[in-house]
Image (cartoon, coloured by chain):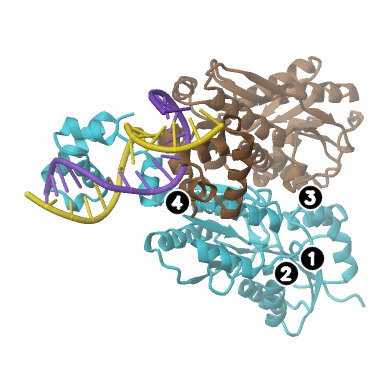
Chain colours: A brown, B cyan, C yellow, D purple
Amino acid sequence: MARLEDVAREAGVSASTVSRALSRPDMVSEATRSRVVAVAEALGYRHNAAARALVTGRTGLLAFSVPSLANPFYAPVIAGAQEAAEEAGCELIVVVTNGSPAREQALFDRLAERVDGFAAAAPLSLSPLLTDVARRLPLVTLNRRVRGVSSVVIDTPSGLGELGVHLAGLGHRRIAYLGGPEGSWLDPRRLRGLREAAPDCEVRALGPYPPEFEAGSRAAQAVIDSGCTAVVAYSSTLLLGLLHRMTMLGVTTPQDVSLACADDLSAAGLTMPDVTALHVPAEEAGRRTVERLVHLVSTGSHEAGHRLLRVELRARASTGRPPAPRG
Amino acid sequence: MARLEDVAREAGVSASTVSRALSRPDMVSEATRSRVVAVAEALGYRHNAAARALVTGRTGLLAFSVPSLANPFYAPVIAGAQEAAEEAGCELIVVVTNGSPAREQALFDRLAERVDGFAAAAPLSLSPLLTDVARRLPLVTLNRRVRGVSSVVIDTPSGLGELGVHLAGLGHRRIAYLGGPEGSWLDPRRLRGLREAAPDCEVRALGPYPPEFEAGSRAAQAVIDSGCTAVVAYSSTLLLGLLHRMTMLGVTTPQDVSLACADDLSAAGLTMPDVTALHVPAEEAGRRTVERLVHLVSTGSHEAGHRLLRVELRARASTGRPPAPRG
DNA sequence: TTGAAAGCGGTACCAG
DNA sequence: CTGGTACCGCTTTCAA
């Protein structure tokens, strides 16, 4: 592999000059710059990340932790995150916490001096611990807001508000809410969003449910027993399972019951053609999270910024007027 | 952050000794070793990855490329890969190629001198290019075999053979095969596995289909038109979509048509309770791939090893005898 | 604007 | 078994 000095010799300048020409072009004359760049190109020069990291203290590595890759929500998130990292010239280390706060903590520890910053999707760790991490290292949380820690949050709670208005407007008065996974930070906020937007409705909270097809299947009976005319599911996999079981039981949509979903994951190969859902900007969320992180890293600032991402209600054929009450 | 020398001073030895005590314990006396370890612990010493990488030439970083995280198959793969990487003291850089060979190539290039080795799931790149990569860097492919390149392949082709025998044994004579994504290396091999195991059956290949719910939905009509009494789907998301649409159309399983799937992704939150499927050891595949890679890296060897992972047929309620021919 | 030289924090060789 | 020392490749003062 060509080193800085090889380029220097070939270009007839010193190694320092090559270093400058490549990373601070404004510090050398245009003539030298272009010559050095040409030689570097010709020699296929690539800077050595370790050497640079050793002297600058910056590794060019960013960690992004997610609770699980099985949840399709994170596929576009990671994709967006990676794009942003790439644009900033960084690599992304994706780590899966498997829903264990202890593991999450261990990961923070293990990676703390190997990466320039940490992004954590829906971190399970307690707020004080996160605040603590943020003191040692740039940290940005996704879908979780902690005092003093930068965050990007997709505003599904207000989206659920829109959904509540939509359903109430159609005439529904009893709505079932199929809750998210145990311990979810967003879950109670979403439920509240739904409740507040539909004060005339009785909202029955069912769950918690993991974001799985199976769980949706299992929930079907509870939904039917609840006597609700509309259902809002936390996740699309959940809804898919519910929909499937309902169809098997001969319950039709939206004639018998209206169905809606708190996130539309068309990007994850799980498009549900005609289901009313909130379109969540997952990819954008991943991108913004990393962009924010890169900003923190490069400015060295620790000021917390919070960003709320709007969701969009996409009303489709799965929601309609409730069935006429049986006489 | 405590450095080697800090530990050395505190322990009353030289930096070299600390280095040895920590990374080659057998080269120092037990007394020094334990003292050094204790001091290091007390000082919270963590070695600096960049400094070590600079001198050893090993970064402790492994890259794992996958075509897309949206395909739930890769969730357990990455999980297993990460576990293996962790055990080997490495970090995993997950990169998504988005189905673009050009991007894949660019990634190889960009990461080549930043990581110790490369794992590529179902790489889209052409064989000669992969062979070339393998010459520069340890490379292990998953679910793709290339001459001279180490690989781990999940033996779904022979699993499809078992599935063929199973279906033929039940009396099916016309089987539809819902093919995998365009350009899939495994797809033709799976189809062949199915065909060869059921020589008495007519196997109708439909597709290609992307691994998406939507696509399965769309395939329903083609399946019905084909007059087949059994269907084998390439991926579970595909099957889910098919199942859903079939149910809506009033086609029942297995009375009207038998359904089976080439991979069972219960690990990915997409369990399909009663669907006959091949259980694929996805997590193990990820683990083995990285283990193999770590082996190549640490021995510096370039010898290609190939590993075939067996799949297991799980016959369940979705397959049964074909309906009696209408008279 | 450019060059020389001093490290960044480790590892490994060579003596002892 | 242990200490001294050179050096990995790059960035960054400091002088010229």
Q: Does the residue at mark 2 contact the one at mark 1 (Cβ under 8 Å)?
A: yes
Q: Position of residue A267 (x, y in %)?
A: 75, 43
In this rendering, position of residue B59 left or right of residue B121: left
Q: Does the residue at mark 4 contact the one at mark 1 (Cβ under 8 Å)?
A: no
Dot 2 and dot 1 within a common chain: yes
Q: What mark, if any, has residue A248 been given in the picture?
A: 3
**What residue did someone put label 1 on?**
B255
Label 3 element class? helix
**What residue did someone put label 4 on?**
B85
In this rendering, position of residue B131 left or right of residue A163: left
- Residue flagged by tag 4: what amino acid is it? Ala
- Residue flagged by tag 3: what amino acid is it? Met
Which sits earlier in the primary sequence, circle 2 or circle 4? 4
How crowded pointer 2 is (Cα within 10 Å; few <14, some 14-19, many 20+) is rated as: many
Q: Does the residue at mark 1 contact the one at mark 3 (Cβ under 8 Å)?
A: no
The answer to whether A144 is drawn above or below residue B118 in the figure is above
Which sits earlier in the primary sequence, circle 4 or circle 1? 4
